[in-house]
Image (cartoon, rainbow, N blue to C red):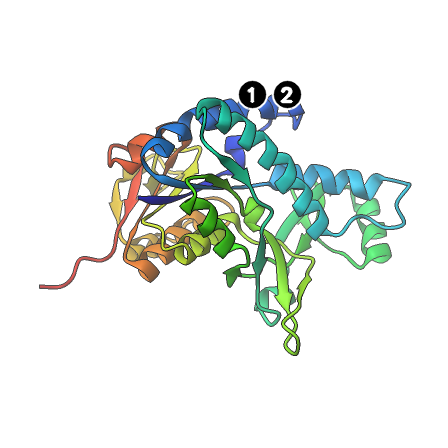
Amino acid sequence: MRIVVSLGGNALLHRGERPDADIQRTNMVRVATAIAPLAHDHELVLTYGNAPQLDLLAAQSTADAALAAPYPLDLIGAQTQGLIGTLLVRTMRDVLPGRSVVALVTHTRVRADDPAFEHPTGLVGPLYPERPARYLMRKYGWHMAEDRHGRRRVVPAPLPERIVEAGTVRTLLETGAVVVCSGGGGVPVVADRATGALHCVEAVVDKDLAAARLAEELKADFLLVLTDVPNVYADYGTPGRRPVLDVTPAELRAADYPEDSMGPKAEAAARFVENTGQLAAIGALDAAYEIVHGLSGTLVRPDLPIA
């Protein structure tokens, strides 16, 4: 089977942890140990979240007095792909001796007329008090939104249309390599209508939706969305919550999961299953092997045909 895995950002850096390099190295061992058994029997693509790393590098760039202006998000996003990519490659090679593991910086094409560009919602960077936030808004033309006890920068979050390097990923898979790519949803780019040239945009792409798009382009058999909970839950956040073990795309959407947690994961799984007729699943990192074999997690399957 060809499996595309979407690793949650909390798989690489747990909630509340300091973003220190040693902590991330330690967490990568857990990731590699959980994923490696799948690589023995299947073609494997690993995608991953980058929010903590992106926020850290964005804060450092904004605070760097040596720069005339902070680095644009496309360069910071590419930096995170290199940072996380090298950690994943080294740890995966340790648990898969003799296996080729390759990290690839990827770009995600989005539509220039995506409505998201008129309504930015993607939070990036650190939390600022009111006065510094207003200063940055004036100086760089940034949009800011209230977040907990301050303000954070918000940028557009357009939908992924195409993974530019999908053909390269396919070629690498055919050599037997495990491919690490599409970090943080990939670097978002738009195409010039006249020339087709690609231009980077100040935006972010949801990593689960990008993973689903990549899985579709690769003709994958299975999309595996890994997070920090064992299942999707009905009535989550209430005393009556219960695990959902088997669900269709329509049922996932009807549950209306929050946009800041399970919502994008549910939508990604639903899209992949609807567009391909294949299977997806959502569950906990440590149960990755069991999820693929139907022993854990929430299975997302096509609607059964009406007799």
Taking 74 as reference, is 286 left or right?
left
- Residue furthest to the left in view is 307
**In this view of the protein, which residue sits in the foreground, 296 or 223?**
223
Residue 50 picture quarter: top right
**Where does the image place residue 175, in percent across and percent down from the top left?**
43, 43
Q: Which residue is mark 2?
A: 22
The 10 Å Cα crowd at callout 2, few under 14, some 14 to 19, many 20 or more, is few
Residue at 26% from the left image edge and 49% from the top image edge: 247
Q: Quadrant of the C terminus?
A: bottom left
Amino acid at circle 1: Thr
Taking 65 as reference, is 33 left or right?
left
Is the residue under label 1 in contact with that under label 2 (CB below 8 Å)? yes
Secondary structure beneath disc 2?
A: helix
Secondary structure beneath disc 1?
A: helix
Residue at 72% from the left image edge and 49% from the top image edge: 75
**In this view of the protein, which residue sits in the foreground, 155 or 112?**
112
**Where does the image place residue 110, in percent across and percent down from the top left?**
57, 64
Q: Quadrant of the N terminus?
A: top left
Taking 227 as reference, is 293 left or right?
left
| Residue 92 vertical placement versus 131 (above, below) | above
Q: Is residue 124 visible?
A: yes
Q: Which residue is mark 1?
A: 26
**In this view of the protein, which residue sits in the foreground, 150 or 265?**
265
Amino acid at circle 2: Asp
**Where does the image place residue 88, in percent across and percent down from the top left?**
54, 32
**In this view of the protein, which residue sits in the foreground, 205 or 164?**
164
Residue at 53% from the left image edge and 44% from the top image edge: 181
